[in-house]
Each structure stands twice: as structure tokens, then as C-alpha cells.
Image (tube, rainbow, N blue to C red):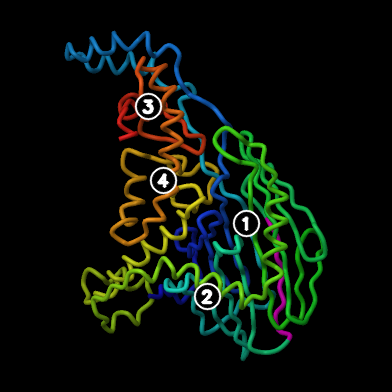
Amino acid sequence: MILFYDKPAAEWVEAIPIGNGRIGAMVFGGTAEELIQFNEDTFWTGEPYNPVNPGALDALPEARRLVFNNRAKEAQDLINTKMMAVPLKQASYQPAGLLHISFEGHNKATDYRRELDLERALTRIEYKIGDIKFKREIFSSAVDNVAIIHISADKSGKVNFTADFNAVQDTKKINTVNESIISLEVNAEGSLRCYSQVKAITSKGKVWVENNTLHIENADDATLFLVSATNYINYNDTTGNPESIVDKQIKAASKKSYSKIRARHIKEYQRYFNRVKIDFGVTEAAKQTTDLRIKDFANGNDPQLAALYFQFARYLLISCSRPGCQPANLQGLWNDSVKPPWSSKYTININTEMNYWPAEPANLSECHEPLFGLIKDISVTGRKTAKINYGSDGWVCHHNTDLWRATGPIDSAFYGFWPSGGA
């Protein structure tokens, strides 16, 4: 149950995803330069809003008359003009930040291996520089609310690196909190801001901050604790205090040893993952790197890849849809763009359903809870849309919704005027 590669990721879609339902990241696995692009599940553009169109109800009788007289194109034009949501576009899911880790002199590595252990939800990067073996273990813990990067070497005092924050947005602030913590604050277009901290703890060696960059020198090993939060409380309330949330979670997690956090993470994750075993047999093909196995699958004999694929789907759902978190959006929990495809929102005419197909047959019922929470929310916001747009009781939602639980018809009538999203 391991995906593995013999080189770092060259682009975002090749990076390894980790997540605890709330904090997700894509791990590239470079040697001289590690890049960890991370997300927080409530960081979106926009602010509380209700995109109902007060003129829609007046246009509804004429739209119906045109439809029933087989004048569909005229009905569509009328709906586009008079009945679509205001505004016509919904919010976009946003990236939270970038953590760069630089290892001077590590550009000529040998014996490289990058892997994702599905049974433990651990990402590992291993390689040698000369005769020294370096290892990173990276995961996102739901039980301790923190993403962890643990860096070690098999010889004492050989762990040296720097770490710093960045973000793709222009509206960002990077600050020093103390001698072992730096922070990042990013503002989305709207009312939300995402606040993150990374803290370094070492075994031997020393840690300091200079120019908002963490420096680790001559350590046996080092652990980085990464936490993010926003001011989002619910779709009607953005008065949260992310600084206090992050401070509390960083302090609580960093009091525990790395081995304890790792063990707690694995035990909690395996409560979900270990419910299902699947075995189609193993052939020699399983010795190849995962990218080659995928490339050769159609012409080869690799039944175990199907089992790995099935369990990878379960891993992704566990990683991006936990009770108390937001449901899996169009890209789950992972996004590196301020303008992601289809805004990375909830496309509820098919894509949201596809994300959740594994929940029940793959024995992950709890992973459904965030989706049920979203449905409960849009049953409230959708009442206004039903009343104002259609003069109806009950509730309605069209083909998309977002963090703010918008329920109006968006984009254009051709595909957006589809009042079956609630169903």
C-alpha cells in the first residue's frame, strides 16, 4: 500500500497530497529545495451573501409560457437576462501559503526515494548526500490539528536548513513571532484572512530566526509544526480569531514529542483506513515506481495497482472530509491557484457526488458528515431562493454552491438554471 517515485515532483499534480480534513498540503520532495504548498479548508474569496434575484419571480410566468410553447431559446434568453443570480459568480477556494525548505549542498543526491504510505498516512523522502542518509517524514494530523515535517540524518549534527513562508497572493504579511516561530497572513478577495505559523524544534543544534526565515544548524533532527486557520465561523459569521486558534494549536502540539504525535496520528487514521482490506494478488510489476506502473498498466499484469488505486481513493477521502470540517470541494482539499478550475467549489450536479461515491461502500460513513452539514445549511439558504425566485415553499439549490452556501442559478441558463441541486 505504498506509492513511490525515484525523483521529486516536477509540477503540482505530481506532488504527494496529505491532509487532516482541515489542513492539506502538496509535498514536492525536492532535495536542495523542498516545497510544501498548503491549504486551509475555510479559506475562500467572498463574504456572507445571498445571491437571490428580486426580479426573477416577475419573469417566471413568461419563461414558463415560452417553454410550454416550445420556444426554449427565447425562454433561455429571458432567464439569462432576468432570472440568474446576482452576482452571477460564486466564491473561489484559495491557497493558504507556501513553505520553502532549503538544504545547502543537497543538489547532488543519490539513492532517492519519495513515497506515500497509505496504511499510515505518512509521506517520506529519503536520499544520500555522500555517505549521509537524510530522511523526511511529513503528515497532517487530525488528532493534533497540525501538519508535521520531521527531518533527520543518520549521522549526528548533520541537519542544516532554512525555512520560510511565501504565498501566491499579493496581500500577504510574513513576520517573526519569536526565535523559533514565523508567521504568514494572507488576505483573500473578500472578508477572509488566513493566518499560519511554523515552529521549529530540534534535537541538539540550534534554531534562530533572521529576516523572517527559520535557521536550523547542526541538529540531529528537527520537527516543523505547521498550523493554519481563518476568521470563518460559519456562512453568516466571519468574526473568528485565527491567531488565537493557531497559537493554541501550535503550543499544544509542540509540547509533545515527534514520536508521540506520529503514533497518535497513525492510530487515529487507521481507525478509518484499516476497516477495509482488498487483495487482487501481487506481481513483479509492483516493484516499479508508481508512475511507470500507471503507464504500463494497460499492457501489463499488475492487479495490485487496482487495489492500490482503490485504497488511494479512501486515503484521499479520509484526508479531505472529516467530521467538523468543510466537505470535499472540487479538488478535495488541495489547490495552488487563486483562480482554480471551476473555482474549486461544490459542483453539485455531479462532481460533489463523485467525491463521495466511496464513502459508504468503502466503509467511511463518517466522511459523509461534512457533506450532510452542507446540505443542512443550503436547506436554510435555499428557502430564500425558493421564495424570492419561484414564489415557492421548501428550498432549492442549483448546480453549484460555495463556502457561503449560495443557492442561486449561476454562470448561464444553459447549464446553471437547474433547480435540482437539493435533490
Of residues 350 and 105, which is closer to you in this image?
A: 350
Give yes or no for contact between labels 2 and 1 (Cβ–Cβ under 8 Å). no
Residue 302: percent from the left, percent from the top? 25, 76
Crowding at dot 4, Cα within 10 Å, few <14 / some 14-19 / many 20+, comes out as many
Tell me which numbered mark, 2 or 3, is placed earlier along the sequence: 2
Crowding at dot 2, Cα within 10 Å, few <14 / some 14-19 / many 20+, comes out as many
Q: Nearer the viewer, mark 2 or mark 1?
A: 2
Residue 262: percent from the left, percent from the top? 57, 74
Amino acid type for the residue under numbered disc 4: Leu
Give the alpha-carbon distance from disc 3 to disc 1, as whole Å. 40 Å
On-image quarter of the N terminus = bottom left
Q: Secondary structure at mark 2?
A: strand
Give the alpha-carbon distance from disc 4 to disc 1, as whole Å. 28 Å
Occupied quadrant, residue 160: bottom right
Q: Nearer the viewer, mark 4 or mark 1?
A: 4
Give the alpha-carbon distance from disc 2 to disc 3, as whole Å. 47 Å
Residue under the point 28% across and 84% down: 284
Rendered image: mark on residue 98: 1
Q: Residue at label 4?
A: 371
Q: Nearer the viewer, mark 3 or mark 1?
A: 3
Tell me which numbered mark, 3 or 4, is placed earlier along the sequence: 4
Q: Residue at label 3?
A: 395
Tell me which numbered mark, 2 or 1, is placed earlier along the sequence: 1
Q: Is residue 344 a member of the stretch shown in magenta? A: no
